[in-house]
Amino acid sequence: MDIEQFRKAGYAAVDAICDYYQTLSERPVKAQVQPGYLLDKLPKEAPAQGEPFHEIAAAFQNDILPGITHWQSPQFFAYFPANSTFEGMIADLYAASVSNPGFNWICSPACTELEQVVVDWVAKMLGLGPSFWTSSGVGGGVIMGSASEAALTAAMAARERSLRRLAGHEHAAENGQIEVPDEIRQKYGQKLVIYGSTQTHSLGSKAAIMLGLPFRAIPVSAEDGYSLRGDAVRKAMEADVADGLVPFLVIATVGTTSSGAVDRISEIGEVLKDFPTTFLHVDAAWAGVAYALPEYRELLRLSELNEYVDSFATNLHKWGLTTFDCTLLYVRDRQDLTQTFDVTPAFLRSKEADAGEVIDYRNWQIALGRRFRSLKIWFVLRSYGVEGFQRHLERGISQCKQLAEAVRQSTTFELVTKPSLALLVFRLSPSSRSDLTNDTLNVLNQRLHDRLNARYDVFLTQTVLHSVETNIFCIRFAMGGVRTTFEDVQATWSIVEAEGEEVLKDWDERSVE
Ligand SMILES: *Cc1c(COP(=O)(O)O)cnc(C)c1O
């Protein structure tokens, strides 16, 4: 494709994308295809001769779009939203146009310096304390692809920090790396333990698998709103220490995936004072962006985060208007990252880095190369402004409040947990039927979910809330879509209500037989 062909094909692509967005609300939210639909349709080998581009573009419409679940649909309420904006899409196009691996400053100075600027913009918008700002020279932020990657990165940094502490030295000599002595690594390397709760996202177990270390999923209670408490952390750690193990990382969550619970950061932080080899990472993949709203900072324990936490991650690609993928990882001390990831062979040395004048982000992450993601944050924040970003968040929260009211009014449904920002967790539980046990309600809600799942015009995800008291099967309704109106929420809620009635009717008929 030459420049003039690209010009034409590019305009046509933008037109096709506009048509897609114009018809998005008319499309059923879920893909209506069977497994293997595309495998059966496409040739088994790449074409020997090149094909005309208009045919390739047409195949996107004909072959690919039918197999797309429309995350950008105003009626998408499953998982969490994955907001994409036109600003983010255009930024990704520009980033692709200067495609480069940006692993150090000299690779493309703008990639590094724009990242430094925008991670601080976001840190300040969220109210993170100055120690997390890159401009502090001590801590700072780095953009990654996912919260799981951020947690693994934090876990690797935590492991090295605890080994350094076990070896009795923490800080590097001027500009130097600290080697952890082999005997310390051999003695403690396999004794380290990660802690989280039963509500921690699978990123906790995955980080543990990657490091070959155990993950303790500490039980929580419904009474505490499914939050991890300090006492429970202390108990688990004391038991491990008694067995000769070494706590090295707690992953606390602000806004759990199942129900939006917020762990008790200060309680955990106080406990960790007695376990100084332990690092505290906060996973706020979904809810972290809501720190942009000052009135929610207390609820989400921002001052505790600023006081106690070593690292913090949030996804701008969920509720934060920034086209996938865009996770921010902030650390209080960048040496935790550089002491772990700075491996510099001669061919990667540069005079700017040697002089300590620039950041080489390759030393803050697992991979060497990296995408130019700061551009989309820059475009989005400049186009929306902090106030526009806040209004977007408020809209999702307000829709959730309205839906919560409808559930409270309903005689067939109940809220299982308090509404959390834009996430509502509810279940079928008819108020007139006190004879139904929790086990029966779990069965009925599973049936409700099966019925909803069989439809293409709704997409809601189920969850099971595990607690020391019991297990509750429930349904999640995640608002916060950029294009979602309350009418969209209501349309889906009406379907849920109708399907709920069917489940109950069916249950009663079968009971009579
Ligand atoms: C979505 C989510 C994750 C996973 O995020 P990825 O970026 O896909 O790894 C982790 N933790 C929480 C609390 C989440 O909501």
Image: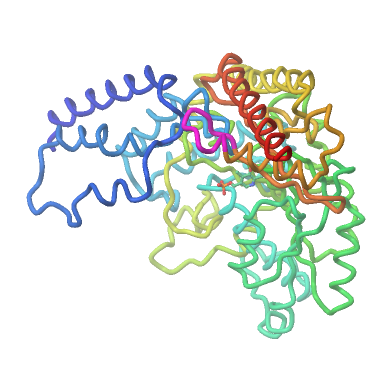
In this orientation, which residue lies closer to the viewer: 191 or 216? 216
In this orientation, which residue lies closer to the viewer: 328 or 416? 416
Q: Residue at x 36, y 37 (%)?
A: 95
Horizontal arrangement in the rendering, residue 258 relative to residue 23 (left or right)? right
Q: Residue at x 74, y 61 (%)?
A: 249
Residue 48 sits above or below residue 316 on the image: below
State the image coordinates of residue 94 (x, y, percent, origin top left).
34, 33
In the displayed orientation, state which residue is furthest to the front.
513
State the image coordinates of residue 156 (x, y, percent, origin top left).
63, 64
Q: Is residue 454 magenta?
A: yes
State the image coordinates of residue 449 (x, y, percent, origin top left).
61, 39
Quarter placement of the C terminus: top right
In this orientation, which residue lies closer to the viewer: 198 or 390? 198
Horizontal arrangement in the rendering, residue 487 relative to residue 237 (left or right)? left
Horizontal arrangement in the rendering, residue 307 relative to residue 87 (left or right)? right
Please report the bounds of the magenta region as a residue range. Answer: 451-460
Q: Residue at x 72, y 32 (%)?
A: 127
Q: Is residue 138 visible?
A: no
